[in-house]
């Protein structure tokens, strides 16, 4: 116990913040019932009446907020707060503190406002007189409403409200090279309307609320600051929205946030609302540590006239976590690398790197529109709570015209965990799909999975997964995009067990089909003598995407790798999902479901699977998600195998330059491929604030043995773009096999005027440009001949 002359609001031992005496000592209690926004009950708070009066309730009121309220009364069962919270709901977590009788754990303290005494339980049982103990007693280090002020080279520490605060209408303020540490709420706070601030070269560490916050500012520059350990105590600091955040610009225009380094942030790294701002070259590591539903970079608008036209470029984000402690059970993570929330429009998001975001990489909310995503890289994003590297809404209902984004040249690399689709799209009505311009993107998955997941709504939400070709046919977009499978074979130095675990998978005779079973009345199986596979095969026919299966001899073992081989062909493009499923109640899937593209061209698959748990009664399970599905399978074989497991992140490293100078990356003696299958060796140069994903070539083999690019299932000639054009247009086409290709241009009279392609080409998506600079305006035709495929389309030259 110690006597003080001033009220103490925060206590530190050296640089470590102590804990106000609390109950429970760790974790949360949970609200059981509420009455309005001021009263609640919960188990575990039972004390005599009036016991909790004057204590503080720190309540998680939403996914993204804590609120703090003083307790006005307690009748033995019900707590009544002095003032209401924004939300008070059943199932949300809280704890109670600022009660002397609850001081019972090392590191806890309490200040008695009547006697000005501090009670302290020192950590480690040491004599408190041997410790350096600091108490916060001053609200501000500097508080001013004046303009034309410079604050330079000053150390601020242990303030209660803000180390530096400006209020009113202010301008031309410079805050330079200061050291601000350990505050209860804010580092730098600028209220009111401000302009032309320069916040440069400062170090801000250990604030419970926000690092830097502006209410409404224009022509302000926030640059080259180090901001770390912000908002790391749940329930401390700032009550309500925008707490636990690194940098907040709540409104304003023509501001610059650049070259800041943020690390260990409880909620959002940088929030920048307003118009025509520039957010560039910031490094954000380890954010969303204490809250949920936010992102490393974030923007929001109450109306379309507030947040628009901002450029977000060359930022590097690593490790976006999320925290749902104190949130009702069953709720999902929603954490994002770059998060464009309601009515953030005409944003340009370019050349950013988002790594290791546990849920979403980039998210465009349902009423955003005309945003541009250009040459961004998302790496190891998604997996937790159905996350994806890119998740965007399209909402064309009620004439609002949302969507219509430009998404070009990006790399969307999914996480190993859960095998998510690289892209998820939500649309309230599939007939009103309006994705805008999508092209030249890379859809990267660890192994087999869909390219795009589409959620649509009539009376309920429906989800369907699409191959890249199905997505192209549905949306008429991504004609030059690629699906890249980075880790189809995750094992090296493999040894295959000779024992076959599928007893009748060759279908040489009709009787083999009897060893397979229909899981539901929606599925029918039959034997077919010839469907383009190897003699007899099994025909799967389902009216509602039902399952088909066969017993695995001996079941499966946890953590054991299995090699699955099978051949397939289908009348139409689609996906079949294959996995291990319990052959007993509750018939749960006990492996990841691999999503395998199927179509009119035969595919011979070799894939690798691992069970989540031991199970002696297990089936190999095939199914589709489409109505009226038909496909054929043959040569089904399953073996145990051993080998050295290579995680996807080890096989596909990302190289990042987070500096302002070009960086030479030396690869040593190892050989790599880029995402187009080109060999990369020796060294290469990374531009400032950029990154590059490579794929290790462990065995010195061809690219197809290391990574797999999904090939077209059929021949397609696409409409040229743009059309009409002047004078250059692009013609895209797809080749299902290696073949001779001839692409020619004809005039309106059918006369051949030029040949664009004439020769042998490999299978894949192709693109060629025609420059019609020497030709007059008018209608022309282009004709593709490849193998037995012939197609002609019209184009229009307008000068």
Image: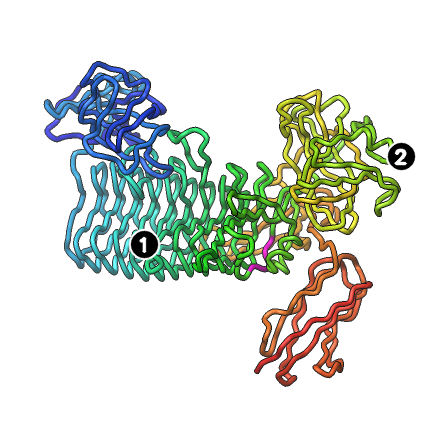
Q: Which residue is found at the position 31% from the left and 57% from the top?
A: 221
Disc 1 crowd, CA 10 A, few/some/many (<14, 14-19, 20+): many
Depicted 385 relative to depicted 457: above or below: above
Instruction: Give the left or right position of residue 774, taking residue 267 as reference.
Output: right
The C terminus - image quarter:
bottom right
Q: State the residue position of label 1.
A: 222
Q: Secondary structure at mark 1?
A: strand
Q: CA distance from mark 1 to mark 2?
A: 74 Å
Q: Position of residue 640 (x, y in %)?
A: 75, 28
Q: Is residue 238 magenta?
A: no
SS class, disc 2: loop
Q: Quadrant of the N terminus?
A: top left
Question: Magenta segment range?
Answer: 438-442
Nearer the viewer's eye, disc 1 or disc 2? 2
- The residue under label 2 is 509
| Res 656 seen here | no
């Amino acid at each position: 116990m110690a006597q003080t002359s001033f009220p103490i609001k925060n206590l530190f031992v050296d640089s470590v913040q102590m804990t106000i005496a609390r109950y429970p000592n760790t974790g949360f209690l949970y609200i059981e019932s509420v009455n309005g926004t001021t009263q609640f009950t919960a188990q575990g708070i039972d004390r005599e009446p009036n016991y909790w009066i004057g204590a503080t309730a720190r309540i998680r009121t939403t996914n993204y907020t804590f609120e703090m309220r003083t307790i006005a009364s307690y009748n033995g069962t019900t707590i009544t707060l002095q003032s209401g919270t924004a939300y008070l709901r059943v199932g949300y977590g809280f704890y109670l503190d600022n009660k002397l009788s609850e001081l019972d754990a090392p590191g806890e303290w309490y200040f008695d406002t009547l006697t000005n005494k501090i009670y302290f339980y020192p950590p480690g049982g040491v004599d408190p007189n041997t410790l350096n103990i600091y108490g916060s007693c001053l609200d501000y280090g500097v508080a001013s409403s004046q303009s034309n002020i410079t604050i330079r080279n000053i150390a601020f520490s242990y303030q209660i409200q803000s180390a530096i605060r400006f209020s009113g209408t202010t301008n031309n303020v410079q805050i330079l090279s200061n050291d601000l540490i350990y505050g209860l709420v804010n580092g730098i706070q600028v209220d009111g309307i401000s302009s032309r601030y320069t916040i440069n070269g400062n170090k801000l560490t250990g604030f419970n609320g926000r690092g830097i916050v502006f209410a409404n500012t224009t022509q302000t520059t926030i640059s080259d600051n180090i901001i770390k350990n912000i908002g790391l105590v749940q329930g401390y600091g700032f009550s309500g929205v925008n707490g636990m955040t690194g940098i907040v610009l709540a409104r304003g225009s023509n501001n610059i946030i650049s070259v800041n380094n943020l690390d260990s942030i409880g909620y959002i790294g940088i929030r920048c609302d307003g118009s025509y701002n520039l957010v560039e070259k910031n490094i954000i590591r380890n954010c969303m540590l204490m809250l949920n539903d936010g992102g490393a970079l974030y923007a929001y608008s109450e109306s379309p006239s507030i947040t628009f036209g901002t450029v977000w470029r060359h930022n590097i984000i690593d490790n976006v976590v999320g925290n749902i402690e104190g949130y009702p059970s069953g709720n999902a993570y929603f954490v994002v690398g770059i998060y464009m929330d309601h009515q953030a429009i005409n944003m340009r998001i370019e050349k950013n790197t988002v790594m290791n975001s546990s849920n979403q990489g980039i998210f465009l909310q349902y009423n955003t529109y005309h945003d541009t995503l250009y040459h961004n890289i998302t790496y190891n994003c998604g997996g937790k709570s159905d996350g994806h590297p890119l998740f965007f809404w399209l909402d064309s209902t009620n004439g609002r015209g949302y969507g219509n984004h430009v998404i070009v040249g990006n790399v969307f690399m999914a996480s190993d965990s859960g095998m998510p689709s690289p892209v998820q799209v939500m649309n309230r009505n599939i007939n009103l799909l309006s994705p805008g311009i999508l092209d030249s993107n890379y859809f990267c998955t660890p192994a087999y999975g869909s390219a795009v997941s589409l959620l649509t709504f009539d009376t309920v939400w429906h989800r369907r997964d699409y191959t890249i070709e199905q997505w192209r046919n549905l949306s008429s977009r991504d004609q030059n995009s690629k699906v890249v499978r980075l880790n189809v074979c995750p094992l090296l130095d493999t040894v295959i067990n000779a024992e076959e675990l599928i007893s009748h998978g060759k279908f040489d005779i009709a009787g083999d089909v009897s060893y397979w079973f229909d899981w539901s009345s929606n599925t029918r199986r039959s034997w077919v003598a010839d469907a383009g596979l190897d003699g007899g095969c099994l025909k799967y026919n389902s009216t509602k995407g039902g399952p088909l299966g066969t017993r695995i001899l001996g079941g499966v073992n946890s953590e054991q790798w299995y090699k699955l081989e099978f051949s397939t062909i289908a009348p139409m493009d689609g996906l079949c999902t294959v996995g291990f499923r319990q052959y007993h109640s509750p018939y749960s899937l006990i492996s990841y479901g691999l999503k395998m593209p199927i179509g009119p061209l035969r595919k011979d698959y070799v894939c690798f699977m691992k069970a989540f748990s031991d199970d002696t009664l297990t089936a190999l399970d095939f199914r589709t998600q489409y109505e009226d599905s038909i496909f054929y399978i043959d040569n089904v074989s399953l073996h145990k195998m051993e080998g050295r497991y290579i995680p996807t992140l080890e096989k596909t490293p990302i190289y990042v330059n987070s500096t302002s100078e070009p960086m030479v990356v030396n690869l040593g003696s190892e050989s790599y491929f880029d995402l187009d299958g080109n060999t990369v060796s020796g060294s290469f140069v990374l531009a400032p604030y950029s990154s590059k994903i490579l794929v290790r070539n462990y065995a010195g083999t061809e690219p197809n043995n290391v990574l797999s690019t999904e090939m077209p299932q059929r021949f397609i000639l696409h409409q040229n773009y743009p059309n009409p054009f002047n004078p250059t247009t692009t013609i895209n086409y797809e080749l299902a096999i290696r073949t001779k290709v001839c692409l020619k241009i004809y005039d309106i009279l059918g006369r051949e005027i030029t040949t664009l392609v004439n020769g042998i080409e490999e299978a894949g998506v192709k693109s060629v440009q025609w420059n019609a600079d020497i030709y007059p305006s008018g209608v022309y035709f282009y004709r593709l001949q490849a193998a037995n495929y012939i197609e002609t389309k019209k184009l229009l030259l307008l000068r």
